[in-house]
Image: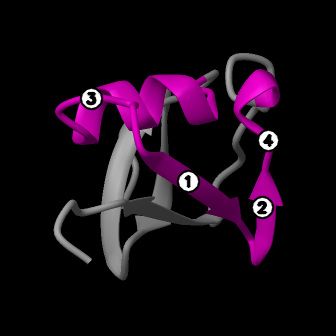
Amino acid sequence: MSGPGAITLRVNGEDRSVPAGATVASVVALLAPSPDGCAVALNGEVVQRGAWAVQGLTDGDHIEILTAAPGG
């Protein structure tokens, strides 16, 4: 459940509370050690990296953050 000024997202299958006004970029920064090699899907649609900073989020959104791993 979200607190005041927060929204709840489903991130990689887990519910997370983030501040209202969060963007894809802010969630990636919170959860990924580095955005390099990351790809993001919001509600099943790929979000281009150039849009991360402006793509707002709303309560109940589903985000998948995928990170490339070296070594094939």
Q: In the rendered structure, are the residues bearing label 1 and label 3 in contact, judged by CB atoms less than 8 Å apart?
A: no
In the displayed structure image, the side of residue 15 where residue 49 appears, left or right: right
Residue at mark 2 to residue at mark 4: CA–CA distance: 6 Å
- Regarding mark 1 in the picture, which secondary structure is present there? strand
Which residue shows up at 74% across the image and 72% down it? Answer: 43
Q: Residue furthest front?
A: 71
Question: Which residue is labeled 2 in the image?
Answer: 46
Q: What amino acid is found at the position of numbered circle 3 in the picture?
A: Ser
Q: What amino acid is found at the position of numbered circle 2 in the picture?
A: Val
Which residue shows up at 36% across the image and 82% down it? Answer: 13
Q: In the rendered structure, are the residues bearing label 2 and label 4 in contact, judged by CB atoms less than 8 Å apart?
A: yes
In front of the other: 32 or 68:
68
Question: Which residue is labeled 3 in the image?
Answer: 34
- Disc nearer the start of the sequence (2/3): 3
Whether residue 53 appears in magenta in the rendering, the answer is no
In front of the other: 3 or 22:
22
- Disc nearer the start of the sequence (3/4): 3
Residue at mark 1 to residue at mark 4: CA–CA distance: 8 Å
- Asked which quadrant contains residue 4, the reply is top left
Q: What range is drawn magenta here? A: 22-51
Question: Which residue is labeled 4 in the image?
Answer: 48
Query: Can residue 3 be seen in this snapshot?
Result: yes
Query: Can residue 4 be seen in this snapshot?
Result: no
Question: Which residue is labeled 1 in the image?
Answer: 39
